[in-house]
Amino acid sequence: MAIPLLLLPGLLCDARLWRDCLPAGAEARIADLTRDDSVAAMARRALELVVDAPHFAVAGLSMGGYVALEVWRQAAPRVTHLALLDTSARPDTPEQTQRRLDLIALSGRGAFKGVTPRLLPMLLHPSRLEGPLAGEVMEMAERVGVEGFLRQQRAIMARPDSRPDLPRIAVPTLVACGDADLLTPPALHDEMAALIPRARQVSFAGCGHLPTMEAPDAVRAALEDWLSPPRSA
């Protein structure tokens, strides 16, 4: 029987993020990361989904990657595989934090707009900005809503620097991103892959920040390879 696969969405994302790229035969359990305002609390709530499992695999995209690293910190003996997609091990820069504070202030004045057409170029490859996928991204953000967004932003701003932990990760780890990701560019994934002893790095061609939606078949193949037993020599 396959071990559970715990999936962690990104900022303003929900289960739709993972819908089309689930590995064949996977027992996927998708966490709700809209209800807590710290990465540690998000990880604790996500772990409730696998409380029945002695071992599990975990994959996170963007903010979900920050939570995946925290899940590993909280439950490392139970984690068999780790996947970090379109994310970073670094904490926020002062400039990033200020941008988040500005967005929180706007939202507090009733100006929350979720993901707008103006922001889509930061999330999707230019070739997809006029297609139906853009609408689905905006719909996800609307479902998360302003209160979920505020909690997520507070969690992201306070996340720790995970780089010192990376050399201690001893499980098969997938580090992957879209080759045109503007929010967490490939150089950040190069850094993580260099620090994680058993990392395997994958680049998704023609993708921005959301390859699980932009190129689900390629992501599914990468996840299936990541979860496969080691090949004999």
Image: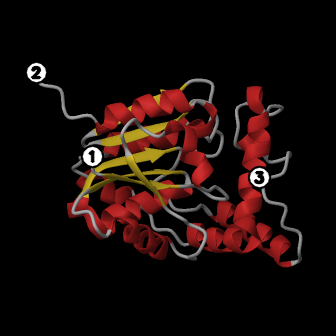
Q: In this view, does 161 lie above or below 220?
A: below
Query: Which residue in the structure is indicated by mark 1?
Result: 2
Give the residue type at disc 2.
Ala
Residue under the image location 84 percent in, 51 percent down: 116
Q: Quadrant of residue 168?
A: bottom left
Q: Residue at x 43, y 69 (%)?
A: 43
Residue 33, position in %: x, y?
A: 55, 66
With respect to residue 74, does 188 lie above or below? Answer: above
Residue positioned most to the left: 233
Which of marks 1 and 2 precedes in the sequence?
Answer: 1
Choose between 102 and 93: the one closer to the eye: 102
Disc 1 is placed on an element classified as loop
Q: Residues within 10 Å of mark 2 (few under 14, many from 20)?
A: few
**Disc 3 + disc 1, Cβ < 8 Å:** no
Q: Distance between the residues labelled 3 and 1?
A: 32 Å
Q: Distance between the residues labelled 2 and 3?
A: 47 Å
Local packing at callout 3 (Cα closer than 10 Å; few below 14, some 14-19, many 20+) is some
Report helix, strand or loop for mark 2: loop
Q: What residue type is labelled 1?
A: Ala
Identify the secondary structure beneath mark 3.
Answer: helix
The correct choice, above or below, for 79 with respect to 225 in the image is below
Tag nearer the camera, 3 or 1: 1
The residue singled out by tag 3 in the image is 139
Image disc number at residue 233: 2
